[in-house]
Image (spheres, grey):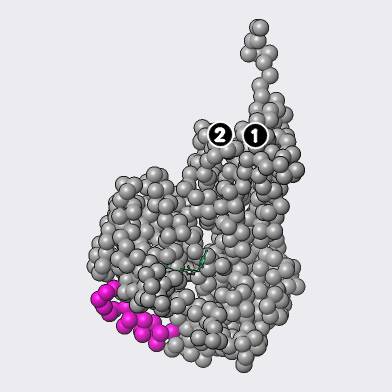
Amino acid sequence: MDMTTDTKLEVTDGFHLVIDALKLNGIDMIFSLPGIPITDLTRMAQAAGMRVICFRHEQNAGNAAAIAGFLTQKPGICLTVSAPGFLNGLTALANATTNCFPMILISGSSEREIVDLQQGDYEEMDQLAIAKPLCKAAFRVLHAEDIGVGIARAIRAAVSGRPGGVYLDLPAKLFAQTLDADTGKNSLIKVVDPAPRQIPAPEAVQRAVDLLKSAKRPLIVLGKGAAYAQADSDIRSLIERSGIPYLPMSMAKGLLPDTHEQSAAAARSYVLPEADVVVLIGARLNWLLSHGKGKTWGGKESKAWGGQKFIQIDISPQEPDSNVRIDAPLIGDIGSCVSALLAAVNTNWPKPPSEWLSAIAERKNKNIGKMGETLAKNPTPMNFHSALNVVRDIIKTNPDAILVNEGANALDFTRSIVDMYKPRKRLDVGTWGIMGIGMGYCVAAALVTGEQVIAVEGDSAFGFSGMEVETICRYDLPVCIVIFNNNGVYKGTDANPTGKSDPAPTAFIKGARYDKLIEAFGGVGVHAATPAELRNAMEEAIRSRKPTLINAVIDESAGTESGRITSLNPSAKKK
Ligand SMILES: Cc1ncc(C[n+]2csc(CCOP(=O)(O)OP(=O)(O)O)c2C)c(N)n1
Ligand SMILES: [Mg+2]
């Protein structure tokens, strides 16, 4: 048959439409793990010039997508196979939603007719129904001509309003469906203004300004929403022009340098109960802020109101009053809300009373002095403090480096000891206190920012994503992993009370050499038993930008149960 090229109809298919739709929307990276039915999608995406970063477990690919979303304000894409791969990615999707990170989990799925009749297909699962309660939105595309709409809806849902996780279900049959190329092209949507600004109402701004003006002991709390918003210079101006002391939540550290004179972080237990008006900027009054009440806030009993009035800046109109009364809700995107407040806080704004500022400074200086003494000690074996004294110096001299942090003691001590100097440099376990984000966050942070990444990992925390050291070596990423090895969960000293040979639930193999693990993949492994050895190894890792894993030996008795949140541990009445 004679078919000359000029009469042949050009066709496209589901695979190419997915890739074209993502690229059209400026998405050029996918975090994935291949298999049926998405293997060819990963190949074709790479061939089309996208970066396709493949992991050893989907949860880590999902965590990478989530933190890429946090760092870039574009939805991070995680691409998985059906049922088990989808489920492995789901924890990351739920965690992203909880933390308000924009991501899209795209999973291939098995044949609808068979799944719906439960006839036992390969990797059969009603994935859409399972994902729905765990994310912000969930969609399924059945026809190739709807791929453009499906991707557009997923992008809008992920980044608009309060960001979150979105699930997009793409059945296997969709990928091979063909369309003529022009129809396909015309079906794609380039999303215009995916995260529209939301301007706060003038009367809401006035209400907030009036309340703030009446304050005698004002306080600003910065949450990770404030870090996400990338309104860094307005937030800094609001704090500096108003003279109000501020407290950064964990991932808001560095929005202003932690060494800023208005930081009240080292006087947290003083400012929370004493403040009379508190401005929450992208911070929710969840468990991390003791729900805005109780003894932490000066309340008489565990659930009693401490007497503070709150101004809450949040993009979600449903957030205020979730835990305590909010007298001045300021609803809108954080950038617009902060700039509206800033306009009112002009040059003749009254500075907070000096008694308030000097009382804070006094506590702060005392606590910083005490910490300095502890950090200067050099005990054998090394403990969290002497090891973190090194990490603290390294971050100080490398303020652009990104610090990933998980564990219990390894988390809590790092958060309070290691100062951050720039916005969005600290990435950690977030709202859930989830273990397992470590290596996924490292991979994505290195790729989307190009900066050196330093991970401080509890030995237990590291285990959740440890196999991704191969991924880090495979992509040759500038990641330096420091494992605080105290032989276990919280501590390495627990013993089996029965005297039998099973180790205690929290204990690991003593003296494990995690540094050997990365050597299997050509990375640099270092065993560090002293602060000097740790310092040399970290400096060398940063100089070389080689994938490095440092096994930092920590006194196995140095930690406490659950780190700083021992009080959340239910204790038995009957011992
Ligand atoms: C997914 C998940 N599983 C379990 C936990 C409970 N948990 C909290 S911290 C932690 C590990 C703490 O040990 P490690 O990382 O070694 O830190 P250390 O306190 O010893 O420094 C665990 C298992 C969790 N937070 N998340
Ligand atoms: Mg440990």
Looking at the image, residue 360 lies above or below residue 151: below
**For marks 1 and 2 on the same chain, the one whose residue lies earlier in the sequence:** 2
Whole-percent x, y for residue 343 in the image: 63, 70
Amino acid found under the numbered disc labelled 2: Asp
SS state under label 2: helix
Q: Which residue is found at the position 64% from the left and 34% from the top?
A: 175
Amino acid found under the numbered disc labelled 1: Phe
**Most common SS among magenta residues:** helix
Magenta range is 364-382
On the image, numbered disc 2 is attached to which residue? 40
Looking at the image, residue 440 lies above or below residue 393: above
Whole-percent x, y for residue 7 in the image: 68, 13
Looking at the image, residue 69 lies above or below residue 18: below
In magenta stretch: residue 373: yes
Image quarter where the N terminus lies is: top right
The span from disc 1 to disc 2 (Cα, nearest Å) is 9 Å
